[in-house]
Structure formats: structure tokens, C-alpha cells
Amino acid sequence: MRLQHLAVLAALFATPACGTFVAPVVPPQGLFFSATSAPIDTNAAKTPVCSKMGEASSSAFFFNFFAMGDCSLDTAARNGGLQTIEHIDYSAFNVMFFYQRFTVRAWGN
């Protein structure tokens, strides 16, 4: 019975903080290194091309033991001075789980 409890605890600590996030498009993730980007919205036919963009990021260090940042859509819009949001995408960067960064980009006017 104790072995089962230890296995559950190990699984909880091994799960990334954003493990439940699912985007419409998820690029492949490398085990040792990855740097990927993908859209969050799925209506490409109605997505206008916008020149203004704002970003917001959060980072995690040392196997997700330390994480900080604000990667909210509201912060991305404020950082870009956007009044309206037309398109959203994200990028993820990972180096062997020692350093990870997740960035949300809001495009609009």
C-alpha cells in the first residue's frame, strides 16, 4: 500500500504545472530541447494581419520546482497597447526541463 502512495506522490511531483493546457495545435516537444510556436485560435480564414503585438511570459526552473511570471492574455494586450485582440498565438521553449518559458502573443489594434 505504501508503494502505491509513493507512486502517486512521485507522479504528482513529476507533472508540469501547465500539464492541463491543451491548444488547438500542439507542436512536437523535444525531450532535451524544443522551441516551438503555434496558434491558439483556429479560425485562420477570418484572422486579419495586424501590425501591433504584445507578449506576456512565464518561466519555470529546475524541473518546475520554481515558476514565475504572468502569461495572461490581459497582460499581453496591455504590454502591446492593444484595445482589441484579433489573433492569439504562443511559443514554448524548453531546455531539458532545467529552463522552460511559455509566451502568449496577442495581435490586434
Image (cartoon, helix red, strand yellow):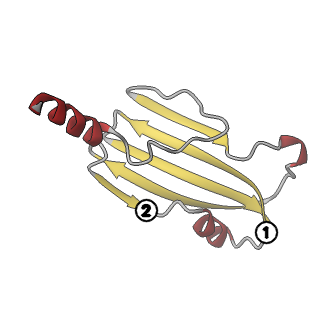
Measure how far apart labels 1 and 2 are at the Cα level.
23 Å
Q: Which residue is mark 1?
A: 84
Identify the secondary structure beneath mark 1.
loop
| Along the line of sight, the residue nearer the viewer: 51 or 59 | 59
Measuring 37% from the left and 42% from the top, which residue is drawn there? 16
Q: Secondary structure at mark 2?
A: strand
Q: Based on the displayed image, in which of its 4 quarters is residue 23 positioned?
A: top right
Res. 105 mark:
none
Residue identifier under label 2: 69
Q: Quadrant of residue 2?
A: top left
Q: Residue at x 65, y 39 (%)?
A: 38
Q: Residue at x 61, y 47 (%)?
A: 90
Which quarter shows the N terminus? top left
Q: Position of residue 36 (x, y in %)?
A: 57, 36
Q: Residue 47, relative to residue 24: is it above or below?
A: below
Count residues near mark 2 (Cα–Cα under 10 Å), then give few for <14, some for 14-19, many for 20+: few
Q: Residue furthest front?
A: 1
* Figure check: 25 above or below 87: above
Viewer-nearest residue: 21 or 107: 21
Please give the name of the residue rendered at 76% of the width and 73% of the height, measured from the top-left corner: 83
Q: Is residue 105 left or right of residue 5?
A: right
Amino acid, disc 2:
Gly
On the image, which quarter does residue 3 sit in?
top left
Mark 1 and mark 2 in contact? Answer it, CB < 8 Å: no
The quadrant of the image that shows the C terminus is bottom right
> Mark 1 Cα within 10 Å, few/some/many (few <14, many 20+)?
few
Along the line of sight, the residue nearer the viewer: 3 or 41: 3
- Asked if residue 104 is positioned above or below residue 54 in the image, the reply reads above
Across and down, in percent, residue 95 comes to 38, 36
Q: Amino acid at mark 1?
A: Thr
Q: Earlier in the sequence, mark 1 or mark 2?
A: 2
Query: Residue 75: x and y, percent?
Result: 58, 68
